[in-house]
Structure formats: C-alpha cells, structure tokens
Image (cartoon, rainbow, N blue to C red):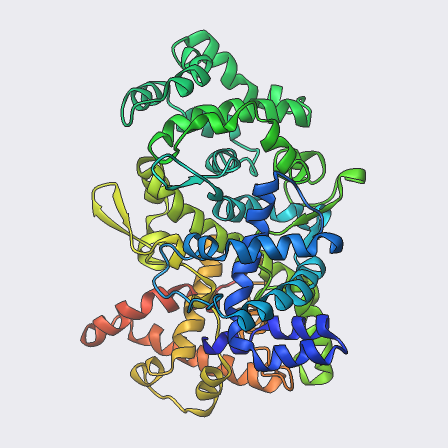
Amino acid sequence: MKLYEKESLFWFGLHKIAKDDPELKYHITTQKELINDLYPLAYFGVIQYTLYRGISISEVPLEETNEYVKYIIDNIDEIYKIKYRFVKEKPKKINFNDKEICSLCEEIIGRLFIPFMNEYAFKKVSNAINMNGAYIRESLLCYEYDINHKSDDGKVKTSVLYPFLFTLNLIKIFDKKGLYNRILKTYRKDELIRKYKAGRDWKQKEVEYLQESYELLNNDEEWSLFLSNFSSSKWDIFDMNERFKALFQLTKITTILMKDEITAVTMLSDGEEVFEMLKNYLPMYIDYDRYIDEEGKNISDLKEKDVLIFSPFTQRNVNLHLLFPYIESKNERHIECDFNKLRAIVFIFLKSYSKVRTLLLTHEYLPKIIDILIEGKKKIFCDILSIFEEVKDHKYKRLIDFENFTEDLFFLTEEQISNALNKECYSLKEFMQIPAFIKMGKIVTFNLALKNYTARTFDYNLFELLKYLLIVFGPHPLDHTIQTKENIENFYKKFENFVRLYEEAKNNSDILEITNELQTALELPLKLLNWKKD
C-alpha cells in the first residue's frame, strides 16, 4: 500500500459511511490494505455486472446487494486479471481461498463499498454534463473488455459498448464545432476499403453484418450522403434517437478500423443493447448541445433526463463531494478556498487525465491517426509531458501505456510536503533533491499544458493554481490538515524560488544538462509566473 493511499480522502468517506457502526469502523482501521486493494476490484466488478445484466443503473438497489457481492466474489480472479493485465506494479492478490478473508470481503463490499458508491459514485446528469468528454474517455477505458464472454480462443472479448464509445471519442463528439470535418478526415473511404480487405479473415456472419456498410463505402454518392448527417445543417435538427442511429452506423464502420482487435463485430447487433445500456448517458454524450452552450452554461432544463448515472471515475482519491465536507470539517485550520475554483481544477484535471489515457489507448489501435494529432502538439506531448517520443519523421511511440498512467503520478504525501517545508535550499541541485518540488512542477505543467483555459481560470496567478492543486493532490489525514494557510504560503515561496533559480540558469551552458532536465517541470510554471496581463 502506497503512502499517499494511506492519506487518501477515501478514508474520510468510508468513515462517513460507517457513521456509528463500530464493526465497520474497526474494519476501516484494521483492514486498510485489504480495503485499499479490494475497492478498485469491486468498482470494476459493478461495471462488469452491468455488462453481465445488460443494464443501466442509477444506484445499486439495496435489495440486490447480495447479487452484486456474489458476482464480484465469484469473478474476482477474472476481474483482477483484466483490471491489472498490463499494470507494472500490481497490488497483491487477495487470498479468497481463505474462508475468513472471503467472508470479510463480502461484508466490506456489501456493507461499506456499495453504500459508498451509492453515496458518492452516482452523479446527476446536470452535474456531469460539463464533463461529458472526460466521461466518454474514461468509460472507454472501463468498458474495453467484458469478462462475461470469451472468444473461441479463450480470450476475453471487447464489450458491446466499446466500439460505440471508441467512435464517440475518436470523432470528439463532445466538441460539435468541426464535427463533420473531423469525421471526413478520420474516415477516409479508400483507407477503410483497404483495411476491410487486409488483416484477419472476416467470419461469414461478419461479412453479412457489414454488407450494407461495405456497399456504402463503394458508392461515392451514398457515402457523401451518409457523411452529410454530421454536417451542422442536419445534425442540429436531428433528435437524440436520430443522432444515435447515425452514430451507430458510423460505429459499424469504425469496427473495420478495429478489425484485428475485435473478435466478432456482429456483437453490436442492431444497436438496441448499446442504446439501452447508455440511454441515461446519451443526453450528455450526444445531445448535450441542447442543454449547455459552448461555454458550458445551461440553456435548457434536462427535466426527466436529469437522472443519476454511474461515474466511470472511481471517486476514491479525487472526489469533490468528499473534498467539500473534508475542508469544512477542518474549520479555520484549513486555508480558505473558493469552491467554484476547487470544482474547476478538479474538472480540468479529470479532463486532462482522461484525455492522455485515451490518447495512449487509441494510439495502440490507430497509430497513424493519433500521430497526426501528436504532430500538431509535439512540444506538449513529447517535450513537456514526455509521454510520446518521435522515432522518425511524423512517427511516434508511446513512452508509457495508459494502464500505467495513473493517479499515482500526481499525489503528494505528508512526508514529502513536510520535507519540502523543513529544508532550506539555495541551489537548483538542492531543490532537485526534494521530490515535492519537482512533482509539483510536473502537476502544474500537466494542468497548464492540456487545457489552455487553466491559467485564465486562476487569473494567471501561479500561487492560486498551486494552492488548489495542493488542496486536491495533497494528503487528507483524518485528525489534522496539511493544507493550512502557513504551509501553502511557505511551500509556494520555496517553489517560486526554485522556478526563479531555473530561470537564471537557463542560459548557463555549464549546467545545461540540469536545466534541460528541469524544463518539463518548470518551463510552464515560469511562463505563468512571468505572465503580464493586458
């Protein structure tokens, strides 16, 4: 169990669920490692259970708790295998052969985790609609596989929702401006026909299933007519069902691009199952422009469509609905903050985080398409964030897989912050020995690089941005707080000094190696520090 996990906001939330139940409080106190390892599996298990049942849920019904628990326990090995299949640092496997441990896990999932999820993991559409892009991207990762079905060779199949979510993300459905042109560039007819003929052999049922799509590709007039569905003149007047129909037809064509990664494209059937499982999400996924404008302001009431949906984010370490009461519980000890700005930085982070993860995933499937995207933002993705590397002209390779691009990269521990506050540093080399300063530089950089409105949101003020990042990514101990006014101001003064030393040393050829190393962490904070508003 990592140190930042011991100091997570998660424990504050679990204690709120346990309330006055001494048995649950005892488990939270004595079974931290078990709880920490079990929760991600239980969360993923709920997602897999919805695939198993083919349902969309607005809560885990209390009367069905035992069914959910049994499913998760019965399938825990497969859940673990898929959840951590490419993760380098896997958590320790829980020994479910031990009857006492198995019984304890059943109790923790049923009495603690499911009430926690019901309280904190289900969000109203109206509260999540501004996060529609992040929800689509993170859902894409959550629903990549369906453990309930295996192909003939024994491999786990991709889920029925995956190609549709993949399509929504690929065309950036959450950004209506330029939708038609993006589809035009991504779905090149000649490339699709070539892809259809290459790779694995289609099964006869797949050939029949894709016959209409293939004929569409071979008819210029029909193809142009189909693409026109996504032009603003048509798209704006389509109702949600018509939009879904057009997108589902496009999804069938997407499966040609994903041919070698999908066992049988016929799983999509007529789209009815996809619609049923996503129906609560569709108003914010494909119909959002009827409810919010380009700036995210409400323009229409969702009414009966404003239902609860299950968040694709685990709500464990980054959770606004826990962070607000946590801050309030610390009274005047916690630095004052604007909850709107706190909400803003959480949204910025989750949008950026999900964007990078899906970019890494999509690059596995469609490297040529993503390479073009990276080419336009090479400085950000290669020089600043160091998640891609150019191996030859206009061709890139991933330096990390999405499974290993996790929240671990962002959280600071109490020990790290205390070390930074207690040490006096007078040179770059001394600052570089303090992990908290380098890490904070990278956290600031990440949030500035991927959302161009981050600086504006925090009034181009480095202190303001750092303050809210420390509130979100700093430790959240139960009995005290690290985020005091004094601590944050002192941390900032030292961080600013670090950035200024970097600025002075940038043109010093004697320490060029050091400044080049620091560029990825400090260049953007320096630009913000020196920002001159008009």
**Eyeballing the image, is 457 above or below 420?**
above
**x and y percentages locating residue 229 in the rendered image:** 56, 19
Quadrant in which residue 346 is drawn:
bottom right
- Left or right placement of residue 484 versus residue 297 in this view: left
| Relative image position of residue 163 (x, y in whole percent) | 47, 34
As drawn, is 362 to the left or to the right of 336?
A: left
Which quarter of the figure has residue 477?
bottom right
Nearer to me, 174 or 153: 153
Can you say which quadrant of the picture contains the C terminus? bottom right
Q: Residue at x 28, y 71 (%)?
A: 515
Q: Position of residue 313 (x, y in %)?
A: 57, 55
Q: Is residue 300 visible?
A: no
Residue at the spot 62% in from the left edge and 77% down from the top edge:
28
Taking the image as drawn, is residue 31 in sight?
yes
Residue drawn 31% across the image and 24% down it: 195
Answer with left or right where residue 425 lies relative to residue 130: left
**Relative depth, front residue between 260 and 467:** 260
Q: Nearer the viewer, residue 107 or 497?
A: 107
Compared to residue 445, the image places residue 364 above or below, namely above
Point 65% across, 79% down: residue: 335
Residue 469: x, y in percent?
Answer: 54, 69
* Count of marks, rendered view: 0
